[in-house]
Amino acid sequence: MALPHFYALVLFSFLVSVVFGAIAKDTPRDRLVYGAKSFGLFVGVAVLIGWIMYFLPR
Amino acid sequence: MPKRAAEEAVVNDRSTAQPAAGRLFGICAAGWLVPGCGHLLLGRRWRALILFAAILTMFLFGLGMKGDFFLTSSDSYLQKLGWLSVWCVGAPRWVAAFFGYSGGDPFFVSADYGTAFLVAAGMLNVLTILDAYDIATGKKQ
């Protein structure tokens, strides 16, 4: 199974965020918010770092 | 008493009771062997199911992408840590080995991602064990 970079990133972020959301916080709503925030940060920071690396000389 | 308050009272009763060391060890060992099983023993069925599904899915994707299991015989500390991480996922690692998966293919295009998935699955299982421990000792609901 060969996943493209971005799909692997999104899948990884989603699964880790699900676990983070499940074990953090106390109410279901807080867990959902925390998981969604975690997922967004995973993907957002990875894309940001990717763009920063794009401008670095190779 | 509203239903929600009654459920919280039951949870509080559970959390204030300190479990015996043997039961605590059993919960952690079960959580290690089968991801989410510690939570199941503590009565958190939905959380157990979510953790089990997420960790097992991650592990299976790691296998599908031909991730590496690492060897203990390596001189590299990082590789030994990698071996420990995959070992932390518990029974799924042994089941994979039983069915002939011995370590993936380093030349496969997604092998590095697969290794990251396998290692992360083990680390997430450690987090779930610690979470089950905290619930069992009453530090957390």
Image: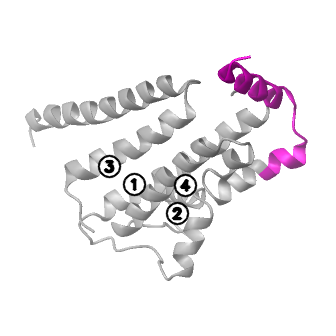
Q: Position of residue B19 (x, y in %)?
A: 87, 38
Q: Quadrant of the C terminus of chain B?
A: top right
A21 part of magenta stretch:
no
Residue located 21% across and 52% down the image:
A5
Given the image, what chain letter belongs to the residue carrying mark 3?
Answer: A
Q: Position of residue B123 (x, y in %)?
A: 53, 48
Instruction: Answer above or below: position of B6 versus A15.
Output: above
Give the farthest residue toward the bottom: B100
Instruction: Answer above or below: position of B124 versus B118.
Output: above
Residues at marks 2 and 3 touching, judged by CB atoms closer than 8 Å: no
Secondary structure under tag 2 reads loop
**Label 3: which residue?**
A11
Compared across the picture, whether A49 is left or right of B20 comes to left
**Label 1: which residue?**
B116
Applied colour scheme: one colour
Q: Distance from label 2 to label 3 (Cα)?
A: 32 Å
